[in-house]
Amino acid sequence: MDIRYRSTRSDAAPITASEAILKGLSDDGGLYVPTQIPKLDKSFAELGRESYQEVAYDVMKLFLSDFTQEELRACIRAAYGSNFDTAQIVPIRKAGGAYYLELFHGPTIAFKDMALQILPHLMITAARKKHEQKEIVILTATSGDTGKAALAGFADVPGTKIVVFYPKDGVSSIQERQMVTQKGANTCVIGIRGNFDDAQTGVKQIFTDPALKARMAQAGYQFSSANSINIGRLVPQIVYYVYAYTRLLQTGALGDAGEINFAVPTGNFGNILAAYYAGKMGVPVHRLICASNTNKVLYDFFRTGEYNRNREFHVTSSPSMDILVSSNLERLIYHIGGDSAAKNDVFMKDLREKGDYVITDAMRAQLTQFCGGYADEEETADAIRTLYSNEGYVIDPHTAVAAHVYGAYAKSTGDKTPTVIASTASPFKFESSVMKALGRETDLPDLELADRLSEIAGVPVPKAVSGLRGAEIRHKTVCGRSKEDMQAEVEKFLGL
Ligand SMILES: *Cc1c(COP(=O)(O)O)cnc(C)c1O
């Protein structure tokens, strides 16, 4: 089956997967969505016998229908190998009545690696297929984890350059250190005096600026995006939901109904959207539990049908979820509106102009699979402490948000469906918050803190952290949060 991609905001002709991966965002500002969600073409029993890489192939081949078998297999081989610290790639740990799907065993110890280790390979392959001569410039806004994962994926990849903007005071100490020490002559990291939404808005505006696009083309450059709006990030994320389901099925953990819940700590809505797509492919998903922190726009949305970004922005211990505009929700809005670009466009216009929209009752009726919840700072810390004291298992604050929300959900609904919690970061990435939650001393240099956490958790300090010892700070630029300030930095780096 030939799957193509169309914009969520216009009825322009659908394009191939390669084209969608290269473009990232549609010219009309919309996101690319598959014209159809393909069904899995192997049984769960068969998939259950396959390795992670094999499942990845069987899922991704259905979406990237213009990639040859050799091309896709080569991308998967390059992405999921010894750069992960376990051969299982995504181990599953049972603890506290749930299954923690550990998505943080890649080089930057956050789940973003799952997609960003493969995206550069997908892009380079797509460019080769399209006989694209221009150099690809990755422009990315990050709330902390995407930036480092994208830098790690693209550093020194020939034919690419990467520029990352992050909120100067909105990421953890380890996260910032990871980014500003990034090696690679093709990398550029810039702090902005603003929050993640400012960074994301600026990037989107730079991206769609027609004058800049023309100048870029003249200089032999073309923008692409490594943000979760790129379909090349979304598709690899579907894989681990299919994989997790087949592992639970295999171990007999699923009940007679064979159903599963996924609880996902959510920011930009990319990870949970991948779980939704896994459901559409055939995984029997009972509930998708969307967990937010104090920035609970999505919780309110699922409760009321109103998406309202006009509210106070909170900096929390789960910074990768400190987001008021969840970009990937647009894809869900498009789907529940009957795959209607016209309808979606009106909502997105309202969001841009008024910061608010309300979906129709008919659309709301299609959201019964979703269930929103949120955890405040105390509940998040509590979830870390409780799981550690009961099971000796240490989780990071993002995962803890989902753990709390799932716990509250299970208690209030009595739902016994086996539940997989997406464990999105290693506790070492947010060690200060974790140590504080555990009631330990936190007033130590970050690398010393890592050693203490290692003793408590009984796991070695990941290479991603120990490797920061003595690493040179290569990126020192900080700029204003306006589109003009940000664009000036991009132009400087590219020599425009
Ligand atoms: C990015 C991120 C999230 C949020 O994922 P989305 O796909 O943006 O919803 C949650 N936890 C961590 C650790 C992350 O890095």
Image (tube, helix red, strand yellow):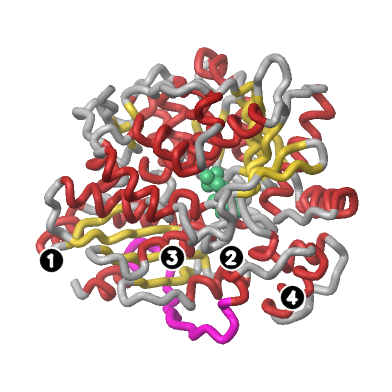
User: In 3D space, how far apart are the residues under numbered discs 4 and 3 (Cα atoms)?
Assistant: 24 Å
The answer, for residue 492, to whether it is visible in the render is: yes
Q: Badge 3 is on which residue? A: 152
Residue type at the position of mark 1 = Ala
- First-in-chain label (1 vs 3): 3
Instruction: Locate residue 470, reporting x and y percent.
Output: 56, 86
Mark 4, ligand 1, within 8 Å: the answer is: no
Q: Image point 51% across, 65% down: which residue?
A: 167
- First-in-chain label (4 vs 3): 3
Whether tag 4 and tag 1 are in contact, CB under 8 A, the answer is: no
Tell me the magenta residue range: 467-485
Instruction: Locate residue 121, reporting x and y percent.
Output: 32, 53
Instruction: Locate residue 4, reporting x and y percent.
Output: 27, 29
Mark 1, ligand 1, within 8 Å: the answer is: no
Looking at the image, which is closer to me, 69 or 327?
A: 69
Q: Badge 1 is on which residue? A: 219
Q: Residues within 10 Å of mark 3 (few under 14, many from 20)?
A: many
User: In 3D space, how far apart are the residues under numbered discs 4 and 1 (Cα atoms)?
Assistant: 47 Å
User: In 3D space, how far apart are the residues under numbered discs 4 and 2 (Cα atoms)?
Assistant: 21 Å
What secondary structure is marked by label 1? loop
What secondary structure is marked by label 4? helix
